[in-house]
Image (cartoon, grey):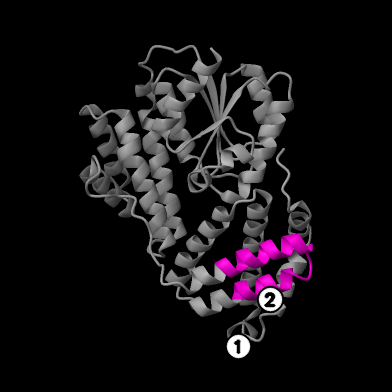
Amino acid sequence: MNISRNEEAVNILNTRKAELAEAIMQSSVKDDSIRNYTPYQKQKCLQDINYNLQYLSEALLLNSDSLWEDYIRWLKFLLLSLGLNKYGLAGHFSVMGEVLQQYVPSEAAEKIRTLTAQASDIMLSDEFFQAKALIESSPFYAEAIKYMNYLLSSQKHKALQLINELADGGISIRNIHLDILQPVQREIGNLWHANKISVAQEHYCTGLTQLAIAQLYPRLFNADSKHHSMIGTCVSGELHEIGLRMVTDIMELDGWDTHYLGANMPNEAIVNTIAELRVNLVAISVTFPLNLHKAEDLISRIRSHPDTQKAKIMVGGYPFINDPSLWQKIGADNFAADANLASKIADSMMGEIG
């Protein structure tokens, strides 16, 4: 397992998180807006500080500045969309850096000071944008917009009918997944992030897309077998599974014998299934960056088990796109940025051993 140079600081952040969050909030009471918070608002503030500490811990553990910086940019867009003041947010990270100096070793303190200063700078910068997931020049843009509008207007039957009609009309499942369902889901996430739809709407749209994917499943079994097998799984606590579902389905379409385990799988169950099925490849999906250490632990367990240690391991998910070195840091054999690349990379990995 990859041991961080900042292991002692990471341990302090994780085991004394509640104490640190309280100290950071108490040091912020000079801010009138915080001093006048209701008990509920104070509880929410502590919750947010805890999240910040968790992301800082994960960035230190994996020695990934970009993981931290990307989180801060994501947080800035979310909180400014909710009407919070960027100067107050920048001040919070300054206070956070000052407080943590008192608790961690000097080498880690310097690193934390750098990261919290970067956070303050990002909050104060004029940067305020969100990358578009749906681009007019993309293939099947019109179909994607139509499908998204059905989702957002709660027209379930029309949304599902559209996907079936597109498949019946000759659009490949690969194109439906990669050019319609995937970018629409990313755009739905963007709308929630920008405070334009509620979390309930986002969950509803996600549920419908999962249903759309499921209704396409019987169409997958047309390819000749490549005589390779794989398991697709999310780590424990990881609830985002649509990307993994698309990877697994496209690999099935490309001739792999796939076994989809889905979201929030405990390590023991994953390792036991790999051992039982003797698969060639394990695809591990991580969308939530705070689950990266869990993926590292799972990989370590797979490597150490005599019946699973020969399986190749490929990872995917947003954190690995943001920091292309992360897959190596957690001990994987490769990573794929999307479902189409996953199938090609998996084939190349089998070529290396066979």
Q: Position of residue 161 (x, y in %)?
A: 27, 37
List the residue tagged with mark 1: 32
Q: Earlier in the sequence, mark 2 or mark 1?
A: 2
- In the image, residue 229 above or below residue 134: above
**Disc 2, SS:** helix
Q: Position of residue 245 (x, y in %)?
A: 46, 34
Magenta range: 92-118
Q: Does residue 99 show up magenta in the picture?
A: yes
Q: Which residue is at a point 45% across and 51% down the rendered structure image? A: 203
* Real-space Cα separation, disc 2 to disc 1, in angstroms: 12 Å
Image quadrant assignment for residue 93: bottom right
**Disc 1, SS:** helix
- In the image, residue 35 above or below residue 322: below
Q: Position of residue 53 (x, y in %)?
A: 66, 62
Task: Name the amino acid, label 2.
Answer: Met
Task: Name the amino acid, label 1.
Answer: Asp
Q: Which residue is at a point 45% across and 32% down the rendered structure image? A: 247
Badge 1, how many Cα within 10 Å: few under 14, some, many 20+?
Answer: few
